[in-house]
Image (cartoon, helix red, strand yellow):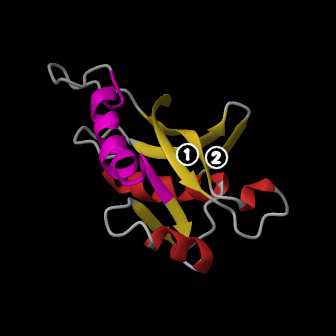
């Protein structure tokens, strides 16, 4: 039997889509929701802390905080070939929190990036076939993107 759980965090993060046909080419920000979807079997080992769970939600939150939130909250994500934005951000100096990435930071690409950041840390010592199934990124209340391998 397979069970699914989801856990999410939120960040305030800036970005731009430099080649966008409309207003998204401008620097702007979102209240992003970063949601991990895990699948596996419920731990049935008697007496362990995770008995009856796939993984403790607190442990999932810790992973999301360390590998997503702490990197992008109150940061600006910029595509490495977006020279105009990089130049503008460099004026603010080394104290500015900027994350340079190798892709245009659309919600779709951020979902894949987040999956790749988090997947190696979703592990279990109980043989319950636990794995990260998908990653969902909400850019606005009406706009989501998901990625799964």
Task: Residue 69: say if magenta.
Answer: yes
**Image quadrant in which you'd find residue 60:** top left
Please give left or right for residue 56 compared with residue 104 in the image: left
Question: Mark 1 highlights which residue?
Answer: 134
* Viewport quadrant of the C terminus: bottom right
Q: Which residue is mark 2?
A: 146
Q: Position of residue 66 (x, y in %)?
A: 30, 47
Q: Is residue 130 above or below residue 94?
A: above
Q: Residues within 10 Å of mark 2 (few under 14, many from 20)?
A: some
**Marks 1 & 2, CB-CB < 8 Å contact:** yes
Q: In the rendering, at what x and y percent does residue 17 appear?
A: 69, 63
Disc 2 is placed on an element classified as strand
Taking the spot 49% from the left edge, 68% from the top edge, the residue there is: 89
128 in magenta: no
Q: What span is in magenta?
A: 53-76
Q: Do we see residue 149 in this rendering?
A: no
Instruction: Locate residue 122, reporting x and y percent.
Output: 34, 46
Question: Marks 1 and 2, how far apart in space?
Answer: 7 Å
From where the camera sits, is residue 143 visible? yes
Q: Earlier in the sequence, mark 1 or mark 2?
A: 1
Q: Nearer the viewer, residue 34 or 46?
A: 34
In the figure, residue 24 lies in which quadrant?
Answer: bottom right
Secondary structure under the numbered disc 1 in the rendered image: strand
- Residue at 51% x, 48% y is 13
- Determine the residue positioned at 28% across, 24% down: 44
């Amino acid at each position: 039997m397979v069970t699914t759980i989801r856990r999410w965090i939120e960040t305030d993060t800036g970005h731009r889509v430099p080649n966008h046909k409309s207003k998204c080419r401008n620097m702007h920000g979102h209240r992003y929701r970063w949601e991990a979807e895990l699948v596996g079997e419920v731990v049935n080992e008697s007496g362990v802390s995770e008995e009856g769970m796939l993984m403790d939600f607190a442990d999932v939150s810790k992973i999301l905080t360390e590998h997503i939130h702490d990197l992008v909250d109150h940061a600006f994500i910029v595509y490495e070939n977006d020279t105009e934005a990089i130049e503008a951000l460099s004026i603010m100096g080394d104290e500015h929190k900027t994350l340079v990435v190798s892709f245009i930071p659309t919600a779709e690409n951020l979902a894949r990036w987040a999956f790749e950041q988090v997947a190696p840390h979703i592990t279990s010592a109980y043989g319950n076939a636990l794995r990260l199934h998908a990653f969902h990124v909400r850019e606005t209340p009406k706009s989501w993107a998901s990625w799964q391998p």
